[in-house]
Image (spheres, coloured by chain):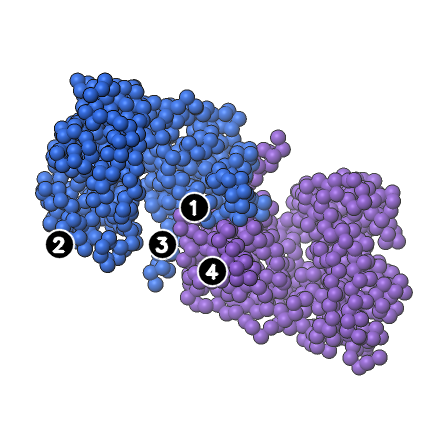
Chain colours: A purple, B blue
Amino acid sequence: MGEKKYAVGIDFGTESGRAVLVDVSNGEEIATAVHLYADGVIDEKLPGADVKLPPDWALQNPLDYIETFKQTIPTVLEASGVDPEDVIGVGIDFTACTMMPTLADGTPLCACAEWKDNPHSWVKLWKHHAAQPEADKINATARARGETWLPLYGGKISSEWFFSKSLQILDEAPEVYAAADRLIEGADWVIWQLCGAETRNNCTAGYKAIWQKEEGFPSREYFAALDPRMADIVDQKMSRDIRFLGERAGGLTEQAAGWTGLKPGTAVAVANVDAHVTVPAAGVTEPGTMVMIMGTSICHMVMGKERREVEGMCGVVEDGIVPGLYGYEAGQSGVGDIFAWFVDHAVPPEYHAAAKQRGVDLHKLLEEEAARLKVGESGLLALDWWNGNRSVLVDVDLTGLLIGATLATTAPEIYRALIEATAFGTRMIVEAFESNGVAVNELVAAGGLPEKNKLLMQIYSDVTGRPFKIIKSAQGPALGSAMHGAVAAGKAAGGYDSIVEAAQRMGGLKDEMYEPIPENQKVYDKLYADYVTLYDYFGRGENDVMKRLKALRATVLER
Amino acid sequence: MGEKKYAVGIDFGTESGRAVLVDVSNGEEIATAVHLYADGVIDEKLPGADVKLPPDWALQNPLDYIETFKQTIPTVLEASGVDPEDVIGVGIDFTACTMMPTLADGTPLCACAEWKDNPHSWVKLWKHHAAQPEADKINATARARGETWLPLYGGKISSEWFFSKSLQILDEAPEVYAAADRLIEGADWVIWQLCGAETRNNCTAGYKAIWQKEEGFPSREYFAALDPRMADIVDQKMSRDIRFLGERAGGLTEQAAGWTGLKPGTAVAVANVDAHVTVPAAGVTEPGTMVMIMGTSICHMVMGKERREVEGMCGVVEDGIVPGLYGYEAGQSGVGDIFAWFVDHAVPPEYHAAAKQRGVDLHKLLEEEAARLKVGESGLLALDWWNGNRSVLVDVDLTGLLIGATLATTAPEIYRALIEATAFGTRMIVEAFESNGVAVNELVAAGGLPEKNKLLMQIYSDVTGRPFKIIKSAQGPALGSAMHGAVAAGKAAGGYDSIVEAAQRMGGLKDEMYEPIPENQKVYDKLYADYVTLYDYFGRGENDVMKRLKALRATVLER
């Protein structure tokens, strides 16, 4: 047993799980291992059965999560040479809402021979989008009853969330619903597997299952109005015993110790969510700094001292990110995936060839070309709704728009206009927070996108008029999870007593920083004014052409 | 001397001149020859001088026109073996307004050593767009004085037209203006070179120089108000002796006979314009049929029995196409060139590779893929303003718009949406005519585009709800010119006494015809309604974002 103490964080992503072993004293990442899920995202047919899935379905296999423990933790232990005795805590983060039905002992229904051929017995991944009718019903019922929790979720519960997915099971497979002793987040399920005790964390409960610290879950009356069979869902299949981020869920079981090579009894933190756990990993534990997890989409996380209602936010949860503060989440549903669409579908061969010749990624090439343009030079403006709009309009039926094209318009010009459009989308969210009393003084980027694209960082800084910094760790979620493991272990064991302390020592930012360039800001202010006009015109009902086009497309395809 | 009689038509295009020798009895095209202009479109620097041209300039060298006579007519005579004695007439058509300053004897100023280094001494090609300030002044002055001719030109005189270009010469090179004994259309100038006598045709005078059969040119007072130095432009540098289409301008001079191999004295018709001459070449000599010359842009030609004012039309001229009828012209400024832009700038390599592998043109491949889509399936809608909008908004500062993009949007879907947008643009023009009492019962296509694209033909028919036919000749303008040559020769010489007769015998349509498919029409009616909403919103001042973006781009580029 050495003097140095370590913690392990495991980040359960969409395609893979990643473990990192970190030095508790300074957050240094000693070793990393990634496990690609064998079944990945299940969206065509069930594994081992000839059952095809309808469109918009996305499932996972919970055994892939167990396999992640088995594959990655022994690897980081071995690679680091760290004595398991010196690993004081384990934390995890997960995609959310990613939920599943299980038996009372935690056995996933999809692992039961009786249920495995029914798609509803599997894990519904966050991006399972087939529960829209259920979400619509949840919202309509809430509006009709004047439920006061609805504004805390931007006025609209998403089809991705817990009760939408639960109601879909009930609607489409009541026998699976009946057989499910528990309905549980994947996040909480893996903690259960590690320490043998079922816990429920306040982060997924708060953001995805409409739980509030003061009010608890929606009322029995509400659930009964939604569907009488669902009246007692919380008491029958969930739990009102909600545990807080950083708490110790339990100690590692003998079985889990066997999987991982860690010592039985090692402290296990309650589960966390990938975006939320990244905030302290960036060293952010105070109001005023917005942490943006930037990838295919953006999650915007910011904290405040009071609970405010902000148009179109995903949710506000007390202690939802850091204890003692209200954690706000908002989001843009299309960012990196819009750039990827563009690169895949709208860039002529000459740029592909040039990128290949220079041995650089096509994004990189386009970024360089786009960086040569002055602000406003392209003459283009876009609405970044290729994948709908989450905040602040909360409308999946909105679509992308490009305006200003001429016979001289080039691919790098469009690429830049798309980046700018996503930056305008972020500014819209920042302004929604600020106009409702939630300060956003500076931005911090995490995730894959910012590292790769300096132009994007500068544009976001110019457009929002705010300094823009970057998280130090390239593995923010896993680091944040390890930090929570250290907090679950506590100071006496060589960890920390609070996530704030852990964040000060283990989290942090790069030295690099982007600051707004005043002359760019001036031009972007003009362009943003036009963005807002188009945003309101197409997004708030004055001209619903996007919805008509989408509905027409759906009708035509159904024929 | 044989029994069969022939006529020669020469079509002076943008990059080349084309002669066709046709059988007068049936319009059969016996021989064709094309001459590529040596100096082509002069838009960077003057030939033989180190004089650079500003943006938006486009000039030609008139010697290229003479060379066209010398190169093409002997070639068609030789290829056909036709005896020059049997060639009874010659006609020409030209781009317009393509104009030039000359000495009193017709010598182009640019052929004078004294003037050749001054860009204003050269031919200003139709697409010379540098006279916008002058056009603005022409329009403002006309509006201020309440000139009644303005509505006959869609409410706006174009920068491309005769007085805009003339005023630019006066503004920027008053010494060239002063030295110009004549300001003349290239069309009329080449006729002058053929028969030694200056004539002015009613088609270019009517459509490009604001001349009307009843009212003549704008008043001396108007020109004086525009610029006192220009008060007498018509009497000093032009002519009030306007000759009508099909009239004999004169007989071929000895010199021109030497150039061409034709007999001296051969009848020469007064000049015509490429789009207008195509109408009788399609056999169309009555109201109700709109002939569309479809290429990079579309010219819409239709005739009526009365003079009506139609929003945004290019012009209405009595006898401007066929004697006894009012010829209307409207236009879309971007059609084929939008498709070309798309193919060059926004189609990913896989489609290029597939086209290459199959040995087909990329347009063809995209057309095939797009043809597999059902109407409305793309979920896309576009405003076809990549090159501004001519009819009905007459606004060069409008730009292209695409709406409805998602992460699943493909290149063939966008390609189809662009074709549909241009079809909606044509429907807008058709409806502008009809709502002002000018019937449009069917469409006829001429030009390069329709031959190549069956999908486009069907879409135009579906969108407009009208039968759509195709001109028989692939060389409509040259054939129409030859027909006018036969009319100039007259029946006694083996030709015709009217263009109506000539059109019946020599012109015509293919058997192929496209008819609207009712179920497509129904969906297109819905899409068109949304097109109109966007058209009005962005095109009529409710949201001038396109102009702001364009102005911003201009400001940024000037810095």
Disc 4 crowd rating (10 Å Cα; few below 14, some 14-19, many 20+) is: some
- Contact flag, marks 2 and 1 (Cβ < 8 Å): no
Q: Quadrant of the C terminus of chain A?
A: top right
User: Sequence order check: which comes first, mark 2 or mark 1?
Assistant: 2
In which quadrant of the rendered view does residue B68 lie? Answer: top left
In which quadrant of the rendered view does residue A374 lie? Answer: bottom left
Q: Where in the figure is residue B361, as x and y percent of width and height? A: 47, 40
Question: In the rendering, which numbered label is found on residue B211?
Answer: none
Pointer 2 chain: B
Disc 1 crowd rating (10 Å Cα; few below 14, some 14-19, many 20+) is: some
Horizontally, residue A180 falls left or right of residue A505, namely right
Measured Cα–Cα span from mark 3 to mark 4: 22 Å
Q: Where in the figure is residue A507, as x and y percent of width and height? A: 67, 72
Q: Where in the figure is residue A528, as x and y percent of width and height? A: 46, 56
Pointer 1 chain: B
Which residue matches tag 1?
A: B341
Residue A204, placed above or below residue A444: above
Measured Cα–Cα span from mark 2 to mark 1: 41 Å
In the image, are marks 2 and 3 on the same chain?
A: yes
Which residue matches tag 3?
A: B551
Residue A278, placed above or below residue B147: below
User: Sequence order check: which comes first, mark 2 or mark 3?
Assistant: 2
- Residue A234 appears anywhere in the view: no
Measured Cα–Cα span from mark 2 to mark 3: 39 Å
Which residue matches tag 4?
A: A369
Question: In the rendering, which numbered label is found on residue B114?
Answer: 2
Quick one: B139 or B334, which is closer to the camera? B334
Measured Cα–Cα span from mark 1 to mark 4: 19 Å
Measured Cα–Cα span from mark 4 to mark 2: 45 Å
In the image, are marks 3 and 1 on the same chain?
A: yes
In the image, are marks 2 and 1 on the same chain?
A: yes
